Amino acid sequence: MDPQEIVPILCKGRQAAHQESSRHAGMSNGPVRRAEQNNIRYYAIDCRSEEQRTRWGRFATAFSLDPNAVEDPDQIEKLLASFQAMRGQVHLCLMGCGLRVWEDSCSNAAEAKEAWAEEKSKLHMCALFFMKQGF
């Protein structure tokens, strides 16, 4: 999925994102419009740490998930219960900080790349968890 398709819907809601994209010339057939035409529903899972969510902001409609929870047997049962009703109804959108945030917050490029690699690893772990559970 392309962030241009998902982020406007997550931030503004489907209707507002479509109206905004339609106002821009040549955007009426853009990614938000395609999502609307295909009736795709997204549910955001914010995999950033509490500190990162506090520092860089929260998505009001996102579920906050500590990536380590997918390895904790006690948490797995709670996670599955939370998401069971959504199985087959929505596309899960796992979100992290992204490389740019790490480049801006780390003291050098090597540190930023290491932090980004660690974040990607956690996101992949979460994605694999949900895939194995049939989401």
Image (tube, grey):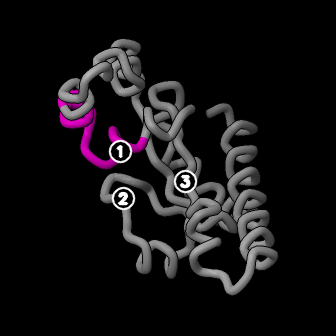
Q: Is residue 8 magenta?
A: yes
Q: Secondary structure at mark 1?
A: helix
Q: Residue at x 31, y 59 (%)?
A: 60
Q: Which residue is mark 3?
A: 95
x and y, in percent, of residue 107 in the image: 68, 86
Q: Which residue is mark 2?
A: 59
Tag of residue 88: none
Q: Which residue is mark 1?
A: 10
Q: Residue at x 50, y 40 (%)?
A: 3
x and y, in percent, of residue 110 in the image: 81, 75
Tell me the amino acid under the disc marked 1: Leu
Magenta residues span 7-19
Q: Is residue 2 visible?
A: yes
Mark 1 or mark 3: whose residue is earlier in sequence: 1
Taking the image as shown, residue 21 lies to the left or right of residue 5, namely left
x and y, in percent, of residue 26 in the image: 31, 19
